[in-house]
Amino acid sequence: MVDVEVRRVVLDADAALERLDRVLARALPDLSRVRLQSLVRTGHVLRDGVAVADPSARVGNGAVFDVTIPAAIAAEPEAESLNLVIVYEDDDLVVIDKPAGLVVHPAPGHDAGTLVNGLIAHCGESLSGIGGVRRPGIVHRLDKDTSGLIVIAKNDRAHQGLTAQFADHGRTGPLERAYLAFTWGIPEPRAGTIDAPLARSQRNREKIAVTRGELGREAITHYKVERVLGTGAPVALVRCQLETGRTHQIRVHLSHRGHPLLGDAVYGSAFKTKAGRLCGPAKAALAALGRQALHATLLGFAHPRTDAIMRFESPLPSELTALLSALEMES
């Protein structure tokens, strides 16, 4: 294995003066601009054998640069063998059907047993390095207790391409994200849009809240009631599509409308008494669920290398299928 790679970038003799990092990013599209800026600052970019220290330096007129790319260093999270459900994988990315209970990224209190730990073990040497570190590139996340589809980049180029699509939220590109949620009560109208800015709650820093004013960040959820279930405590199966991707967005938006998710202990605790009005099988299925009833059922995007449209669907997992069946019995 080659530990160090050197690439030469030659500018045209009549090239206009531009920032160095912008020139390098155009010539080396598989490396992120942030990664290239880091290489410049650490002395890995030479012009005529002399290190160029400033990424914003203006260059042009036939300049020649040698860019040394060190091998990606080992990721800090340790590799762990996990039973991952891999829906699709190639040299650039991997799509996982994440079970509820699996944390995506190491964090205080969850420094092991995460999706990142499992991917480091599974992908091994096929991870070419995100920002110079041999690790998976997380471009979006699912809550620990939300199941469903998630895509992860395996190299800088894929990370850049996917990140741009998620930043656009599908407004001008092919990105699609849809979720299935079980809500207490039936949202009215039965199809619509929730446009309510979100921010960290000032009362409880562990929660997100609808917030007006400068603190709130734009958050838009489109929803449609797919089915009405139950009688003693009506429940709706709601399909949600995200136009933005804020933390806890669907959970907070539906709770804000008065229809929190079944099993959501954070945003639906005031509705626990409704569970007592469910029939025996539905009550047992909800108790066994032990998490919010939310599943990422659809994920679509353009492949960051080929531009081919990739579209994946995930059916409800067994625990949500059991809840659905029990509610159907009560209907």
Image: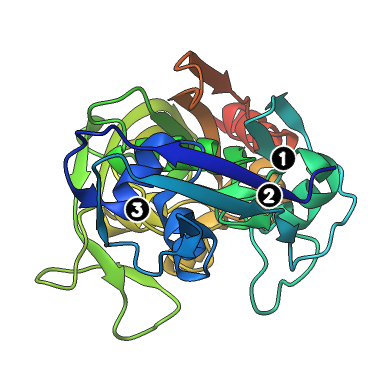
Front one among 138 and 263 = 138
Q: Nearer the viewer, mark 3 or mark 1?
A: 3
Residue neighbourhood size for the residue with mark 1, other residues' Cα within 10 Å, grouped as few (<14), some (14–19), many (≥20):
some
- Count how many numbered circles sit on residues in the image: 3
Which numbered tag is attached to residue 100? 2
User: For residue 123, what is the image quadrant?
Assistant: top right
Q: Name the front one of labels 2 and 1.
A: 2
- Looking at marks 3 and 1 on the same chain, the residue that comes earlier in the sequence is marked by 3
Image point (65%, 38%), residue name: 320
Task: Tell me where residue 10 appears, x and y as whole percent.
Answer: 40, 37
Of the 4 image quadrants, the one containing the N terminus is top right
Tell me which corner region of the image, top left, top right, bottom left or bottom right, holds residue 189: top left
Residue for badge 3? 21
Image coordinates for residue 20, horizontal then vertical, percent: 32, 53
3D distance between C-alphas at marks 2 and 1 = 10 Å
Query: Does the residue at mark 3 contact the one at mark 2 (Cβ under 8 Å)?
Result: no
Amino acid type of disc 2?
Ala
Of 142 and 131, nearer the camera is: 131
Tell me whether circle 2 and circle 1 mark residues in contact (CB < 8 Å): yes
Callout in the foreground (3, 2): 3
Going by the numbered disc 1, the residue's amino acid type is Glu
Q: Residue furthest bottom?
A: 203
Q: What amino acid type should be assigned to the residue bearing mark 3?
A: Asp
Give the x, y percent position of residue 18: 21, 48
Look at mark 1 in the image and give the residue it sits on.
Answer: 319
Instruction: Give the CA distance from mark 3 to mark 1.
Output: 50 Å
Instruction: Tell me the residue at 58%/49% (across/down).
Output: 137
Q: For the point 30% across and 39% down, which residue is it? A: 62
Q: CA distance from mark 3 to mark 2?
A: 41 Å
In the rendered image, residue 202, in percent from the top left (x then y), is placed at 29, 84
